[in-house]
Amino acid sequence: MHRTIEDLFTSHVTTEWLRDTRRVFHAFPEVSGQEHETMKRIVGLLDDWGVEVQAPVAETGVVAILRGKRPGKTIGLRADIDALPIQELNEDISYVSKNPGVMHACGHDAHTTILLGVIKLLQALEGDFEGNIKCFFQPDEEDRGGAERMIQEGCLEAPYVDAVLGLHVSSGFPPGKVAFKYGKMYASSDMTKLIVRGTSAHGASPDQGVDALLIAAQILTAAQSIVSRNVSPLDSAVVTFGKIRGGRVRNQIAEEVVMEGIIRTLDPKMRIEVRERLRAICENIAEAMGGRAELQVIESYGSLINDDAITDVVVKNTRELLGEDAVIIRDKAQMGTEDFAYFAKARPSCFFHLGCGFVDRDTPPTHSSCFDINEDCLEIGVKLQAYNVLTLLNSLK
């Protein structure tokens, strides 16, 4: 199978095609929910290749299907396609963003290109495989989360998808290195908004009012006890308030304070417990101090949990394709979020990190205005994902 993939890559994809394709996507980025031209560009390429296409899905997403000549399982591959509202500062590159204030600062241009490369490579098999391959070009990863909406619109059905794979470039290591985390990989996320209400009075007569600022300060301090005293040292959670506003003038007791933040957890049960503990702290402190507190929790992405069996296959393939030293096994989850979690919740999945760092200079982190990738990772990503798909089609009986 190695030889087949190498031959198909050389004859049907090539490193030059990947580089040029990625640079076009990079030069014309579009923010979450606005990926209209990106969608048209993807659909145009797929149409040229004669690939079965469903679009739009979730407003600006695309589903591509390669059907095998023989019955079998269906494997899904996902790539996110949106960019970030960041002004790019890489003025020395020819493919710098042409859209002011928008930039592919998270590598989604690479993800999109890799998935197109996989389709281009596997399309050359002319259906000489068992089962089907469904490819999800997912919009809106950086904002509302397009994965959930694609699933709601049926992307995992007809044909039924048995497993899903996804990847994300990582600037922390060079091309040829691939990082995996078994089980819990990313945290779940909840957005919080706390409204603290007191009673206004003159600042020189604080006894005549209820100070919402003072109540908020007590809540802000007490909330930190959740992680230190209510979460097991063997588990992980984050409770953060990153925005606070309240008061009108310096000589008035504030009647209202609004605080906004996030909760991050790895365990679904702990997710509920942290919410309830934070709500109790907010309401009880406010009541004890003569005020009122209303905590609003907006549920966002769930925890991304990799399937051990699917991950085993991808780890084995990586070692066979790239060598024993290519694999990095991480023992700690990350407290960031990733809406591939919706795919991983719906089907057995593996999400992994593909090295894209430069070896001769520092690589800025994702979401940096100077982020760029070592394009050597594109070829590795295509070959690895193609190998993964063909292996899973043969092994999932």
Image (cartoon, rainbow, N blue to C red):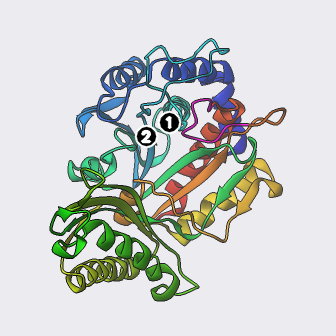
Q: Position of residue 383 (x, y in %)?
A: 64, 40
Provide the secondary structure element on which disc 1 rests: helix
Relative depth, front residue between 238 and 127 = 238
Residue at the image point whose x is 81% and y is 52% from the top:
323
Quick check: 204 above or below 227? above
Relative depth, front residue between 387 and 198 = 198
Residue at the image point whose x is 35% and y is 24% from the top:
43
Query: Quarter of the image holding residue 384?
Result: top right
Query: Quarter of the image holding residue 146?
Result: top left
Quick check: 373 above or below 262? above
Residue 37 is one of the magenta-drawn residues: no
**Residue 108 shows which numbered tag?**
1
**Please, what is the three-letter code of the amino acid marked with disc 1?**
His
Is 57 situated left or right of 322 in this image?
left
Q: Which residue is mark 2?
A: 80
Q: Residues within 10 Å of mark 1 (few under 14, many from 20)?
A: many
Q: Which residues are magenta?
A: 363-371
Q: Are marks 2 and 1 in contact (CB under 8 Å)?
A: yes
Is 322 situated left or right of 18 in this image?
right
Quick check: 265 above or below 244? below
**Count of labels shown?**
2
Quick check: 213 above or below 219? above
Q: Position of residue 203 (x, y in %)?
A: 25, 62
Mark 2–mark 1 distance (CA, rounded to whole Å): 6 Å
Q: Main secondary structure of the magenta part?
A: loop
- Give the mark nearer the N terminus: 2 vs 1: 2
Q: Can residue 158 be seen in this snapshot?
A: no
